[in-house]
Amino acid sequence: MGTIKNFEELKIWILSRELVNLVYSDFRGCKDFTFRNQITAAGISIMNNISEGFCRQGDSEFRQFLNFSKGSAGEVKNMYYIAQDQQYISFETADDRREKCQAIIKGTGSLMKFLKNNK
């Protein structure tokens, strides 16, 4: 893991924390409880899997949790299309959030690749 001692130092965790706060803010008043619960849970999953994987035994296990996190970021990204289509939020907001999801997906993939090559 190099010089990183805590998961809070990981850029992907920092980005995921920002994203989950935006998800809560964007859908706080949403009456579609099924949608709101799903996107919130997926956002939380991004953060939780990064932190849980970091605290596991080794790089292989960490990569597995990063893969879960990456999948959850894809889910949140997709749900912002649904939110846009259902007019829960504006195109601009949805597009911004999808860009944030994509940055997490890309960063997670890069970290997974680094961990795999660092055996």
Image (tube, grey):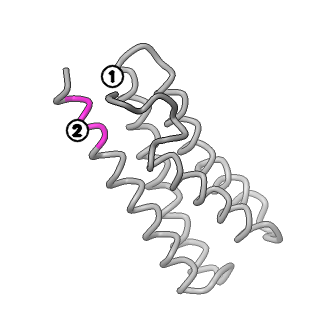
Q: Mark 2 touching mark 1, by CB under 8 A?
A: no
Left or right of 20, for residue 57: left
Look at the image and tell me in which quarter the N terminus lies: top left
Within 10 Å of disc 2 (Cα), the crowding (few <14, some 14-19, many 20+) is: few
**Magenta highlight on residue 33:** no
Look at the image and tell me in which quarter the C terminus lies: top left
CA gap between label 2 and label 1 equals: 11 Å
Residue 59: image tag? 1
Residue at 66% x, 47% y: name it.
41
Quadrant of the image occupied by residue 94:
bottom right
Q: Name the residue under label 2.
A: 113
Within 10 Å of disc 1 (Cα), the crowding (few <14, some 14-19, many 20+) is: some
For this rendering, which residue is in front, 51 or 84? 51
For this rendering, which residue is in front, 43 or 52? 52
Q: State the predominant SS element of the stretch in magenta.
A: helix
Residue at the extreme front of the image, as rendered: 3
Residue at 47% x, 53% y: name it.
73
Q: What element carries label 1?
A: helix
**Magenta highlight on residue 112:** yes
Left or right of 45, for residue 54: left
Q: In this view, does 116 lie above or below 105?
A: above
Query: Which three-letter amino acid code belongs to the residue tagged 1?
Result: Asp
Image position, residue 101 (x, y; %): 46, 61
**Sequence-earlier tag: 2 or 1:** 1
Image position, residue 118 (x, y; %): 19, 26
Residue at 54% x, 33% y: name it.
51
Image position, residue 6 (x, y; %): 51, 31
Residue 97: image tag? none
Image position, residue 9 (x, y; %): 49, 41
Query: Which three-letter amino acid code belongs to the residue tagged 2?
Result: Lys
Q: Give the range drawn in magenta.
A: 111-116
